[in-house]
Amino acid sequence: MNSITRTFAAIAMAATVAFSGVGVATAAPLAPTQSVSVIAAKKAPAITINKISNKTVKGSAKATIKPSVKAAKGVKVTKKLLTVKQGKKTVAKNKASVALKAGTYKVTTTVNYTVSKKKLKVSKTQTLVIKKAAVKKSWAAPKGKNCPAGFPVKGNKTGSNNEWKYHVKGGQFYDRTIPEQCFKTTSDARKAGYRASKR
């Protein structure tokens, strides 16, 4: 009898809880964990060999090139040298600087350096072009008695060099002179060996 009484009491208690609106607490779901990736900073090279820029020279002049090198902190450069080839020919080998005429070359920069007393070496090869500067033309060939546009000064060769004369527009003999050369300026005519006409 007592067991039946206890059973009914348990059922009555459960019903009371259900109708009272009291729910059983449940654990809230956990938010997903976000992963954070850490990117390590890229380590700078111990030695950076910079590209030697192309050069331009006048006439038969030469351009002097030297190694262009940058060392990181704590790195000591002990030697930096150039080896230059033109085709299969070695123009210079292990030089601190090289003078080169117009042409195309293969230039190898070699750097010896030390890091924490450790001796190391690195090299880099590049193509170097040395151009010849365009020559400004100071005179032009005439067309009969006339000079082309931009070259108004008439150069007339008669006899020896002492008789070479140049004529400018407005001069007494300008229109009748048949020139051998026509110049941009009187300065160009004088450099070529002409002297001014007296008339």
Image (cartoon, rainbow, N blue to C red):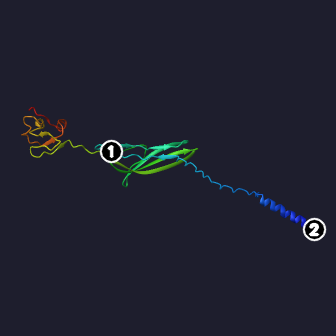
In terms of sequence position, does the residue under pointer 2 or pointer 1 come before the other? 2
Q: Is residue 31 left or right of residue 94?
A: right
Residue at the image point whose x is 84% and y is 62% from the top: 12
Res. 13 image quadrant: bottom right
The spot of residue 127 in percent (x, y) is: 39, 51
Which mark, residue 1? 2
The spot of residue 128 in percent (x, y) is: 38, 49
Query: In this orientation, which residue lies closer to the viewer: 79 or 46?
Result: 46
Characterize the local packing of mark 2: few (<14), some (14-19) or many (20 or more) Cα atoms within 10 angstroms: few
The spot of residue 171 in percent (x, y) is: 9, 34
Q: Is residue 176 left or right of residue 133?
A: left
Q: Which residue is mark 1?
A: 56
SS assignment at label 1: strand
Q: Is residue 78 left or right of residue 37?
A: left
The Cα atoms of the two marked residues, 2 and 1, are separated by 119 Å
Could you tell me which quadrant the N terminus lies in? Answer: bottom right
> Disc 2, disc 1: CB below 8 Å?
no
- Of all residues, the one furthest to the right in this rendering is 1
Count of residue discs: 2
